Image (cartoon, rainbow, N blue to C red):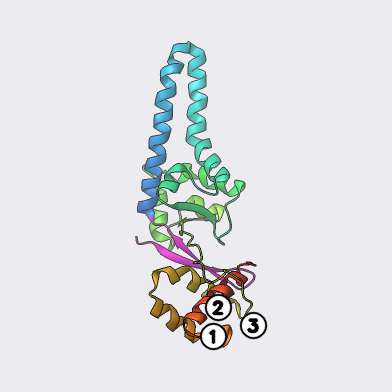
């Protein structure tokens, strides 16, 4: 199954594109987390074996925490990321794109008991292949989605870096387009930047290189810059 994009709309009318992760990167992230948990368990078992029955009791508690508490605590404390997900640039978010909450993290991870049936995460894999955004049963019940983390590209410095209000009011989708231009501009040639900036010359009141500079300023203004 290929990764797909889920588009959701905020109450403000802004469209958010959430690049949903498919089964393969999620499985790799899970394997990394499994290796970490096994490493911790192996290291601690050597010491706990010296404590006799008390060590066995502590070992069982540690095993429970690593199996069930590890993903819940990581996702709740670290903005939806376990070490495995962080290594693969994945994150758990709510289905509307908001950060995942504690309740959702608990529900999606406790329902792994169902996703693991009958063995090897068979139910979860089948559900993920059938769902258009690769969600397993735990995600469907908890209202969550695993997405690829998109790198935040800082706005390039333009002129004095001032924020410039628009000459005309912009609709939400136009605001998104201006911010997207500023984020992607470093990957464009200067000629292409000017070509795109000329299209919105009525908004910036300038063309050419000055239009590009003013468009950066409008993007800063839309993002709350001063």
Q: Is residue 72 visible?
A: yes
Q: CA distance from mark 1 to mark 3?
A: 16 Å
| Residue most extreme to the front | 160
Residue marked by disc 3? 169
Residue 204 horizontal/vertical position (percent): 57, 83
Based on the displayed image, in which of its 4 quarters is residue 166 positioned?
Answer: bottom right
Q: How many marks?
A: 3
Q: Secondary structure at mark 2?
A: helix
- Which mark lies nearer to you, 1 or 3? 1
Q: Is residue 149 left or right of residue 221?
A: left
- Residue at coordinates 51% horizontally, 81% vertically from top-left? 210
In this view of the protein, can residue 106 be seen by the observer?
no
- Bounds of the magenta span? 1-22
Q: Percent x, y for residue 39?
A: 39, 30
Q: Nearer the viewer, residue 103 or 183?
A: 183
**Is disc 3 in contact with disc 2, using a CB cutoff of under 8 Å?**
no
**CB under 8 Å between discs 1 and 3:** no
Q: Which residue is mark 1?
A: 206
Q: Earlier in the sequence, mark 1 or mark 3?
A: 3
x then y, percent, for residue 4: 41, 64
The residue that disc 2 covers is 214
Q: Is residue 13 magenta?
A: yes
Badge 1 marks a residue whose secondary structure is: loop
Q: Nearer the viewer, mark 3 or mark 2?
A: 2
Mark 2–mark 1 Cα distance, whole angstroms, equals 7 Å
- Sequence-wise, the earlier of marks 2 and 1 is 1
Q: Quadrant of the C terminus?
A: bottom right
Q: CA distance from mark 3 to mark 2?
A: 15 Å
- Report the front residue among 20 and 14: 14
Q: Residue at x 48, y 68 (%)?
A: 183
């Amino acid at each position: 199954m290929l990764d797909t994009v889920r588009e959701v709309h905020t109450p403000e009318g802004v469209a958010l594109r959430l690049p949903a992760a498919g089964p393969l990167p999620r499985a790799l992230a899970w394997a990394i987390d499994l290796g970490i948990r096994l490493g911790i368990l192996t290291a601690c078992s050597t010491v706990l074996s010296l404590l006799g029955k008390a060590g066995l009791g502590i070992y069982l508690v540690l095993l429970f925490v690593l199996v069930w508490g590890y993903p819940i605590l990581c996702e709740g404390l670290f903005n939806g990321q376990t070490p495995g997900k962080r290594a693969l640039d994945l994150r758990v978010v709510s289905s509307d794109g908001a950060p995942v909450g504690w309740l959702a993290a608990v529900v999606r991870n406790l329902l792994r008991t169902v996703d693991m049936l009958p063995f090897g995460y068979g139910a979860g894999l089948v559900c993920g292949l059938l769902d258009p955004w690769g969600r397993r049963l735990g995600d469907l019940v908890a209202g969550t989605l695993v997405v690829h983390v998109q790198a935040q590209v800082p706005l390039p410095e333009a002129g004095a870096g001032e924020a410039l209000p628009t000459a005309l009011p912009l609709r939400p989708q136009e605001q998104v387009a201006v911010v997207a231009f500023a984020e992607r501009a470093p990957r464009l040639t200067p000629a292409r930047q000017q070509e795109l900036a000329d299209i919105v010359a009525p908004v910036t009141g300038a063309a050419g290189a000055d239009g590009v500079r003013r468009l950066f300023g409008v993007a800063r203004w839309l993002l709350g810059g001063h």
